[in-house]
């Protein structure tokens, strides 16, 4: 089975030391990416670690596909205990950093400890350097990348950094790379901020010598020649469909469609797209560089999830206003989904839906923990009672844009996902929208037979995150192509994904979470029976936990 190569580099920012450790067995069993990060966390992070404490680690990882020139492979993984969900969580970012990371010669980089001074950590194939940067306190993401470019000659493609939100431990702060790409969900930027690390750079000339089968060129060619609508509109191409079937959260989840959708849909985004945007080596080029010259707004995006969170959920019907919100979040380093939903919750409490000036002020206040922003920075689960609004979260993570009240399999997925209400954990929504050309489409309502499908899709998504291969490769990465690229039977590859999901669940079980946390703020017919069926298929206990003996078996050497 093809897997990533190289050691684990552990960087202790408390002592400003580093060491390399061989992890060949972990790589062989978990391929790379999310799987390797999850297995290393089991080995090296205490189950009771404080997300903001020195004992929590962040694991940056790539996979074997980052040794290829194939489309859909410009991605990286980061794993750690989330300050938003209090659980082990992996986040995935695109852009151009993955190959610079691989060039350091490491399969994984662990950031642990807690520095007494604000640092940049420079990782190269020759070692690690620590640079004190007190002058970058409160610096925005563009200011950090400009500093690194001017002082070290490294572009933003070499940089993972935080903005003011990460320094202030906003619980949904992102780690940003290439300025506009984010390790977004779960607040891992706040973990980096708690470690007093402003940025990490990756550079070198020691990429692993992995032979990726030539079938990669078939995938690359198909990506280049496809006329997929995402090449024009990215994920916003689904906006009208979601609105039509009533799966577009609106006015802080109180409604399921938005009357102003034409002002924020895929056409509105495409009208302001001024060039192509992509990730490293990818010919699919689905990113969305947009600008509005009249109002002086330029950003990358917004994607569909941000169109929901800062658009329909805030009752904003002007795409340029959403673009501005997107840009502010990128600048300050915050997850656009959670930040928009948090703002929407506040608007609901104050009856201020559609107040764009207030929205943009709140984004800045949250990032700097100024005024009411200090409370909002804690996330919906922690402030909803104070604001007297509903708690639209699962496991502390607020909902994405494909509403589970309409797409019931996606609703089940939100409930059981180890990350919480995250649409990317299984992408069940993609099979429940009524697409004419989708032979394997499912009826959106009802849960009969869907637990097994959720599991299959969770395993496939975890496999992609080990590879690492982009979610949007699903029309191109067939089971046969997975087998050809990774030199293994597809079922064996899916079993790797299954082990990753189970290990995540075990870690979180050891932190005290169980079936009670696999819940929704709304009712779905047959939900409890579907939970039982899901656990049974997974081989987990009916209380939603995974025992240590099960995890030990997964981690044991063959």
Image (tube, rainbow, N blue to C red):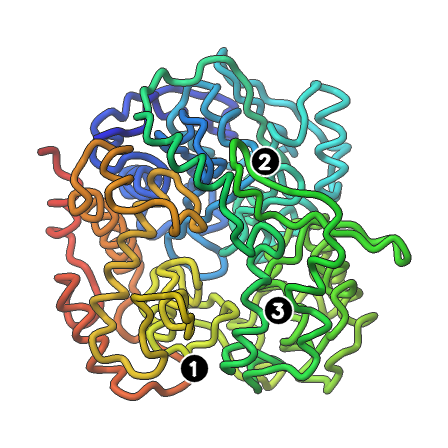
Q: Nearer the viewer, residue 276 or 412?
A: 276
Q: Nearer the viewer, residue 47 or 157?
A: 157
Mark earlier in primary sequence (2, 1): 2
Q: CA distance from mark 3 to mark 2?
A: 25 Å
- Residue, disc 3: 309
Q: CA distance from mark 2 to mark 1?
A: 37 Å
- Residue, disc 2: 160
Q: Mark 3: which secondary structure?
A: helix
Image check: 46 left or right of 155? left
Residue at screen point 61% across, 43% down? 176
- Residue, disc 1: 406
Image check: 488 left or right of 376? left
Residue 177, horizontal then vertical, whole percent: 60, 38
- Please identify the quarter of the rendering in which residue 221 is found: top left
Mark earlier in primary sequence (3, 2): 2
Total of numbered circles in the picture?
3
């Amino acid at each position: 089975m093809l897997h990533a190569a190289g050691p684990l580099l552990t960087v202790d920012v408390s002592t400003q030391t580093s060491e390399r450790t061989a992890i060949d067995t972990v790589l062989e069993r978990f391929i790379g990416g999310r799987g390797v990060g999850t297995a290393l966390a089991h080995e090296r992070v205490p189950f009771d670690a404080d997300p903001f404490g020195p004992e929590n680690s962040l694991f940056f990882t790539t996979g074997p596909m980052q040794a290829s020139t194939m489309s859909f492979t410009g991605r990286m993984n980061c794993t750690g205990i989330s300050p938003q969900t209090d659980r082990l969580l992996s986040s995935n970012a695109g852009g151009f950093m993955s190959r610079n990371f691989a060039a350091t010669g490491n399969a994984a980089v662990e950031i642990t400890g807690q520095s007494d001074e604000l640092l940049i950590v420079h990782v190269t194939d020759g070692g690690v350097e620590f640079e004190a940067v007190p002058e970058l306190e409160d610096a925005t993401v563009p200011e950090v990348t400009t500093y690194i470019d001017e002082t070290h000659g490294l572009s933003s493609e070499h940089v993972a950094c935080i903005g003011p939100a990460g320094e202030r431990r906003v619980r949904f702060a992102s780690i940003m790379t290439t300025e506009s790409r984010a390790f977004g969900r779960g607040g891992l930027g706040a973990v980096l901020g708690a470690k007093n690390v402003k940025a990490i750079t990756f550079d070198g000339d020691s990429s692993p010598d992995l032979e990726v089968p030539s079938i990669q060129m078939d995938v690359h060619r198909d990506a280049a020649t496809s006329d997929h609508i995402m090449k024009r509109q990215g994920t916003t191409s689904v906006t009208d469909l979601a609105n039509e079937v009533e799966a577009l959260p609106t006015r802080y989840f109180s409604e399921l469609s938005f009357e102003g959708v034409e002002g924020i849909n895929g056409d509105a985004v495409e009208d302001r797209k001024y060039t192509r945007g992509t990730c490293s080596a990818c010919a699919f080029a689905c990113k969305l560089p947009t600008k509005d010259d009249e109002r002086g707004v330029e950003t990358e995006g917004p994607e569909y999830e941000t169109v929901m969170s800062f658009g329909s959920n805030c009752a904003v019907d002007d795409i340029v206003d959403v673009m501005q919100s997107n840009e502010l979040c990128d600048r300050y380093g915050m997850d656009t989904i959670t930040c928009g939903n948090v703002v929407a919750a506040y608007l609901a409490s104050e009856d201020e839906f559609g107040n764009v000036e207030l929205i943009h002020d709140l984004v800045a206040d949250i990032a700097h923990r100024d005024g009411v922003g200090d409370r909002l920075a804690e996330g919906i689960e922690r402030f909803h009672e104070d604001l007297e609004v509903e708690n639209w979260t699962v496991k502390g993570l607020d909902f994405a844009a494909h509403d589970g009240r309409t797409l019931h399999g996606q609703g089940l997925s939100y409930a059981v996902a180890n990350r919480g209400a995250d649409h990317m954990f299984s992408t069940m929504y993609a099979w429940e929208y009524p697409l004419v050309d989708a032979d394997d489409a499912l009826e959106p309502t009802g849960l009969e037979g869907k637990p097994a499908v959720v599991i299959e899709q969770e395993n496939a998504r975890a496999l992609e995150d080990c590879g690492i291969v982009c979610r949007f490769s699903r029309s191109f990465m067939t089971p046969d192509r997975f087998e050809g690229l990774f030199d293994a039977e597809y079922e064996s590859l899916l079993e790797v994904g299954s082990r990753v999901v189970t290990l995540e669940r075990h870690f979180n079980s050891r932190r005290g979470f169980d079936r009670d946390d696999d819940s929704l703020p709304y009712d779905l017919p047959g939900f409890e029976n579907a939970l039982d069926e899901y656990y049974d298929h997974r081989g987990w206990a009916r209380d939603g936990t995974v025992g240590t003996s099960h995890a030990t078996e997964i981690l044991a050497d063959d």
